[in-house]
Image (spheres, grey):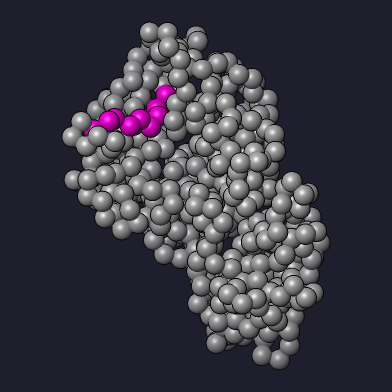
Amino acid sequence: MNKRHTYCNPLSLPDIPRGKDDWYPFERGMFSHERKPESVKTPDYRSISDPTVFYHDGKWYLYPSYGMAWVTEDFENWKHVKTDPYCPKYSPCITPWKDKFLLTSWKCPLYVGDTPTGPFTELGEFIRPDGSTFTPCDPCIFTDDDGRIYMYAFSGLPRKDRPGEFISRIVGFELDGEDPRRVVRGPVTVLTQNTEEHVFERFGAFNQDVEFGWIEGPHMLKHNGRYYMIYATPDTAAPNYCMAVAYSDTDPLSGFVYQKRNPLTIHLTGIVKGAGHGCVEHGPGGSLWAFYTIIAPSTFVYERRIGMDLVDVDESGELFCPSGVTDAPQYVPSEKTDKRPGMNATGDFPLTAWRRPEASSEREGREAFYATDESSITWWQPKADDKEPTLTIDLYATYKVSASRIWWKDLGLDYAKGILPGAIRYVIEGFDGETWYTLLDRRDLNEDRNIDYCDFDAGVCRKVRLRITECPKGISPAVIDFTVFGKRYMKE
């Protein structure tokens, strides 16, 4: 399986964590317990977002909101290494410090660990020059080549002309190299929302608010001597969520100008909507990769997933994505990654998108078409007495099918009652015009894959069929997205 070493967005990560947005006001610092406060009435759901990716010793370490961390050595298969503490609230960030690693997160103290996956122990809250303490919002910690440490965070500046409103901005601090809790310089305003010149910063799904914007989620990248401030805007629950870039050739805290090629990542249509709050990090062979947040608010407004795409630098030193934000199979990062526009793609098309499936059964309001409608907030749900639900799709022509992506909906999830996520087992079959045969057999799957992307030996198909064979106890099978990928079959 995965014969060609590919990936597809949203990323197929094991053990996507539990969403805990409504819990955070009750917690100080990072926390690991699983008991939901009685006052929180939101149904149980899962979410993963706001990724910081740390490139260290030839590996990627991915730290997202809600839980951490995920590690890959081959840039294809991610392993979940449960850290202590496990839940970092929102937007964790990490940086090397001497022979250790500093970690913090949204409204959290500073932590330190001996390895990139901890365990981490608390050093304490950050300390201003006047001795008062604080915890940053959406922090980023960055260590420069000379060993000096900087932190960036979101900050709202009250508006004098309109009481109750604020101007969002990114502020920066220099931290004490011996005691990194202590601020030695700052806060310094690095970026301020500019809704007059930057339409993409205007709040609203259509950037309709010409006077209010939201910039957040800073991440600092240093590449070829230039400092790149990557930031998110304007709304983490809207399809126009994106990342933009400003850069400085002088200093990590000053001299930033906005690049012309903004936004860096944005995607308004398809299953991969939004491409905000994340980072750009180095990969194999000196390549650059963007990791970003994908909106998926089917249960809760802040339910999200994660994607990644190739980044390059143009002749002016500006960052751009040669293939844009992608929702079809791409080759995994390697020493030989082809940075030319579109050349990292396999060339496979989504074949089932907008096709109307035939289902063995469907609940009222959860029709089969919702599995192929390119939406992350609708889903197909078979009837309760359907013991082996099937979804059959006519491709209307003959194709060579070589990959699939299934995004499951965890209906019935209830952590308090012990109804937990787990492996959903299934088979994908192809019809060549005469015979049904197996394209992909996942009946022995033992790993929780909320999004399951697989690359397999190509089969010639006129139709495809998904057959669900087993679900975790208490979980009802439902499908947010079922896509097969391939190319038109041409007889030689």
**203 left or right, relative to 387:** left
Could you say which is closer to the camera, residue 83 or residue 167? 167
Tell which residue pokes out farthest to the front in this image: 39
Height in image: 196 above or below 459?
Answer: above
User: Which quadrant does the C terminus fall into?
Assistant: bottom right
The image position of residue 93, as x and y in percent, is: 51, 31
Height in image: 143 above or below 231?
Answer: above
* Residue drawn at the location 35% of the way across and 56% of the way down: 205
Question: Based on the displayed image, in which of its 4 quarters is residue 164 positioned?
Answer: top left
Look at the image and say whether residue 153 sits in the magenta stretch: yes
* Residue drawn at the location 50% of the way across and 49% of the way down: 302
The image position of residue 458, as x and y in percent, is: 65, 73
User: Which quadrant does the N terminus fall into?
Assistant: bottom right
Tell which residue pokes out farthest to the bottom in this image: 434
* Residue drawn at the location 47% of the way across and 23% of the way down: 135
* Residue drawn at the location 60% of the way across and 81% of the way down: 357
Residues in magenta, as a range: 151-159
Question: Based on the displayed image, in which of its 4 quarters is residue 218 positioned?
Answer: top left
State whether residue 58 appears in this view: no
Height in image: 277 above or below 270?
Answer: above
**380 left or right, relative to 291:** right
The image position of residue 482, as x and y in percent, is: 60, 69
Look at the image and say whether residue 452 sits in the magenta stretch: no
Could you say which is closer to the camera, residue 31 or residue 22? 22
Q: What is the chief secondary structure element of the magenta stretch?
A: strand
